[in-house]
Image (spheres, helix red, strand yellow):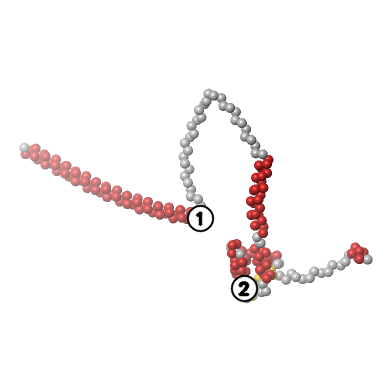
């Protein structure tokens, strides 16, 4: 009886130690897995935040979001039919009347746009007319401000005005006037009277 009791006690001690060790190992594994899950959740939250920021930037740039192309399953092979098929009838070509009636509509839609663009004055003519109306030379900033107030829908920038002014100076229609460290612009004086042309012999004969 004493040997059986001793053996049972040893087995119980071994099982207790093994179960205790397995329990501690299980708890450590649970803690490790929880830590990994928390790290993955934090990583997922970071990725979702970055994704929302990138989507907003993508939309602000006016781009379209890429979409994954759906996978197309291969089309089944057509079954052979025993019955003979009737030959397909050719489609009727569009009549010349239909083509002629469609052409004027397209021209009518395109015409207003072309007329609107051609009727809009160029920046060169606007700046030249503005300087012609002024009694004193004007700086680039003053001309750009006047153009912006007169034509706010065109979004005229000072750099473009300066380039246009220099082009007009190169053509000789505008003069550059320097006052101290500042540069001003004014229109050139081209109102000289034209020289008289001598009368030809034919005109003398005609008068006689």
169 and 91: which is toward the camera: 91
Where is mark 2, residue-wise? 182
Residue lying at 65% horizontally and 54% vertically, measured from the top left: 112
Label 1 vs label 2: CA separation?
A: 39 Å
Of the numbered discs 1 and 2, the one sitting upstream in the chain is: 1
13 and 206: which is toward the camera: 206
Image location (x, y in percent) of residue 58: 48, 54
106 and 67: which is toward the camera: 106
Helix, strand or loop under label 1: loop
Specify whether 177 is left or right of 199: left
Helix, strand or loop under label 2: strand
Between label 1 and label 2, give the one nearer the viewer.
Answer: 1
User: Quadrant of the image for the C terminus?
Assistant: bottom right
Image location (x, y in percent) of residue 122: 66, 61
Tell me which corner region of the image, top left, top right, bottom left or bottom right, holds residue 175: bottom right
Say few, some or many: other residues with alpha carbon within 10 Å of mark 2 (under 14 / 14 to 19 / 20 or more).
few
Residue lying at 60% horizontally and 62% vertically, measured from the top left: 154
Tell me which corner region of the image, top left, top right, bottom left or bottom right, holds residue 205: bottom right
Q: Report the label total.
A: 2
Taking the image as drawn, is residue 45 in sight?
yes
Specify whether 30 is left or right of 11: right
Extreme-left residue of the structure:
1
Say few, some or many: other residues with alpha carbon within 10 Å of mark 1 (under 14 / 14 to 19 / 20 or more).
few
Where is mark 1, residue-wise? 61
Specify whether 124 is left or right of 21: right
Up-down relation of residue 93 to residue 105 (above or below): above
Extreme-right residue of the structure:
208
Image location (x, y in percent) of residue 32: 28, 49
Up-down relation of residue 129 to residue 69 (above or below): below
User: Quadrant of the image for the N terminus?
Assistant: top left
Tell me which corner region of the image, top left, top right, bottom left or bottom right, holds residue 161: bottom right
Taking the image as drawn, is residue 157 in sight?
no
């Amino acid at each position: 009886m004493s040997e059986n009791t001793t053996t049972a006690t040893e087995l119980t001690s071994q099982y207790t130690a093994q179960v205790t060790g397995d329990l501690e190992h299980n708890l450590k594994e649970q803690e490790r897995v929880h830590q990994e899950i928390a790290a993955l959740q934090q990583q997922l939250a970071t990725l979702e935040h970055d994704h929302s920021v990138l989507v907003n930037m993508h939309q602000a740039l006016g781009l379209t979001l890429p979409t994954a192309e759906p996978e197309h399953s291969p089309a089944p092979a057509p079954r052979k039919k025993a019955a003979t098929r009737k030959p397909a009838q050719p489609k009727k070509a569009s009549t010349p009347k239909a083509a002629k009636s469609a052409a004027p509509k397209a021209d009518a839609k395109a015409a207003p746009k072309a007329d609107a663009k051609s009727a809009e004055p160029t920046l060169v003519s606007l700046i030249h007319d503005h300087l012609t109306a002024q009694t004193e030379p004007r700086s680039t900033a003053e001309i750009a401000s006047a153009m912006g107030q007169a034509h706010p829908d065109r979004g005229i920038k000072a750099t473009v005005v300066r380039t246009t002014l220099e082009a007009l100076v190169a053509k000789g229609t505008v003069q550059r006037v320097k006052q101290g460290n500042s540069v001003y612009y004014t229109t050139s004086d081209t109102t000289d009277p034209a020289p008289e042309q001598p009368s030809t012999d034919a005109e003398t004969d005609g008068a006689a």
